[in-house]
Amino acid sequence: MSTTAESRESQKASRTRVDNVVVRFAGDSGDGMQLTGTEFTKAAATAGNDIATLPDFPAEIRAPAGSLAGVSGFQVHFASGAAQTPGDEPDVLVAMNPAALRANLADLPEGGILIANIGAFTKPNLKKAGYDENPLENGTVDRYRVYAVDISKLTTAALDETDLSSKEKARCKNFFALGLMFWMYSRDPQREVAHIEAKFASKPRLADANARAFKAGYYYGETAEVFQDVVYEVEPAAFEPGVYRNISGNEALALGLVAAGQLADKPVFYSGYPITPASTLLHSLSGYKHYGVTTFQAEDEIAGVGAAIGAAYGGHIAVTASSGPGIALKAEGVGLAAMTEVPLVIVDVQRGGPSTGLPTKTEQSDLLQVLFGRNGECPLPVLAASTPSDAFDTAIEAVRIAITYVTPVVLLSDGYIANGAEPWRLPDVSSLPAIASSHRRDPEGFQVYQRDPETLARDWVVPGTPGLEHRIGGLEKDALTGNVSYDPLNHERMTHVRSEKVERVAREIGPLAHTGPDEGDVLVVGWGGTYGALRQAAQEMQRRGHRVAHTHLRYMNPLGEELGERLSRFRRVLVPELNMGQLRLLIRARYLVDAIGFNKVQGQPFKVSEVVDAISDLL
């Protein structure tokens, strides 16, 4: 064995095995933290770990460099077991400048690892971050395991032989940090070098520079004695056999919509206006033209929903998407879709509000808006995805309900789901059930609002079909002919029919997602992206010997009868939400249950420890 081989074998033997790790990269919004976190996440997924991520970036297009407002972060939890959340707190914080340290240090537990880029801790940068003294030198960080590395200087030195400008060299320091973390967590550097070369293939100078910086970081960790005691290894997680890929919520939503089009054997039409955090749905879908997907970037939100209504009327699987403010603008159009009864999927990727609010932060802010935010009695089926990968299944379900019942359907996601990522087991496409869709072609006895007796769906007729020419619109229609009607009793009848159609969707709900005892002391009820934190908190209380269960909802309207029965079997009901209590309001009103709210509106997801404490308070 060569000396180098002996050295590496010795280093491998000294690695400490851990079950799970939470790493947070933090720096200026121009430091490439999102790219760094994404690349490290890919490495964890490739190594077979279960993962959960939390990208966290500023809303400003370009906040002043080095300012607190410009801090961007990316947290990744990777584990040899289940990673149900991105983690309550980081085990490792990589701070690329003073502002990143100030914004994130409070989350690092005592004894946690802090890697600080001391090259950025200059007097001007310290002042921008609000520090009068260098926190690395005045005792502020004494509670942590601090590794001060001049990443800026070492990156520049590694790129001395390149023809890059000083500014271009400085922009490569995120890859130095990435290389160092690859060393600390025993990742394969050669695979990442190949990824860098592929990612920057069109810019060979940057590909070479980033690869050099990455290798410099990796080998710095290997050769610097100070890092020999912080080398860890996380074993692969035990997954069901299959092919997996790392996927974000918006990517999964896009693939679900594409799959729904194939399952229904119909083209997909998507129209929308760019808005954070829904915009990447348009970006993803635009790449699937070869699967019959047409994407249209509208001039505003109203045009987006209008185009989608036209596509639905014309026989397409029609989808439009936005976030809270855009959903408000679409409200009149959604009411038109409800009155005309066309199959339309409206995706709402929620964010903090009201108004422009917190564009890049997550919140469950729109439940009451999508349920009641239209004029008149205008109920719609509403579904909510629970995890990034679940968005795939929820998208297919939303399309199936829209076509089966010939109705608009709202699909709720949120910023946490949309931007977060996890491993997704690719489904066996042949096992996905087809979505039955048909267009009436027989003109005999045709009436526009003649209904299926089971679903109350009217016939979905493609305009221009011989003998079936018809019109629909926003004015109230006769219950059979579809002609405009101002008859009071007819209006009441149509209002009840539209409502009953939505209630019949309850037949599709199936068993509720539930973990824990069927009766007990506390039932935790949740929806949307809170799934992982609530489930893990309930399981922790179960391990402590308490009769605590967790029920998670996919169907927000109708809620179904099983939920009422489930609520009655527990002494207390806790409803944690990232809002001021919207689902709690519905549960109390419908089931007359004294549900207790646990509410957080900070633009951040729940920590498991927060939910555990809330359950403990009820016990």
Image (spheres, rainbow, N blue to C red):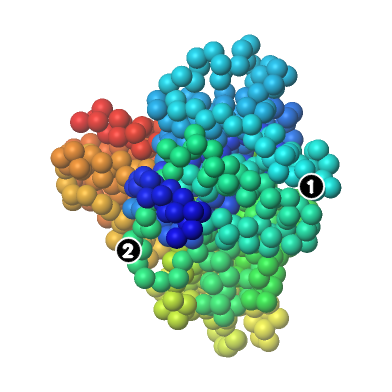
In the drawing, what numbered circle is on residue 161? 1
Secondary structure found at label 1: loop
Query: Does 611 appear above or below 305?
Result: above
Along the line of sight, the residue nearer the viewer: 490 or 246:
246
Number of residues whose C-alpha sits closer than 10 Å to that of mark 2, classed few (under 14), some (14–19) or many (20 or more): few
Q: Position of residue 365 (x, y in %)?
A: 52, 39
Q: Is residue 475 above or below residue 443?
A: above
Quadrant in the picture for the C terminus: top left
Question: Of circles 1 and 2, which is in front?
Answer: 1
Residue placed at 46% from the left, 66% from the top? 244
Few, some or many residues within 10 Å of mark 1 (<14, 14–19, 20+): few
Q: Amino acid at mark 1?
A: Glu
Q: Earlier in the sequence, mark 1 or mark 2?
A: 1
Vertical position of residue 506 compared to residue 535: above or below: below
Coordinates of residue 281 in the picture (x, y in percent): 63, 57
- Label 2 belongs to which residue? 510
Pointer 1 with pointer 2, Cβ within 8 A: no
* Residue 219: image tag: none
Left or right: 81 with respect to 392? left
Is residue 309 or residue 214 the one in the foreground? Answer: 214
In three-dimensional space, the C-alpha distance between marks 1 and 2, rounded to whole angstroms, equals 63 Å
> Which residue sits at x=60%, y=77%?
266
In this rendering, position of residue 303 left or right of residue 195: right
Picture residue at 23% right of the left edge, 36% below the top: 572
Q: Position of residue 436 (x, y in %)?
A: 48, 79
Label 2 sits on what residue type?
Gly
Q: Tell me the quarter of the picture where residue 328 sits.
A: top right
Give SS at disc 2. loop
The answer to whether one can see residue 85 in this image is: no
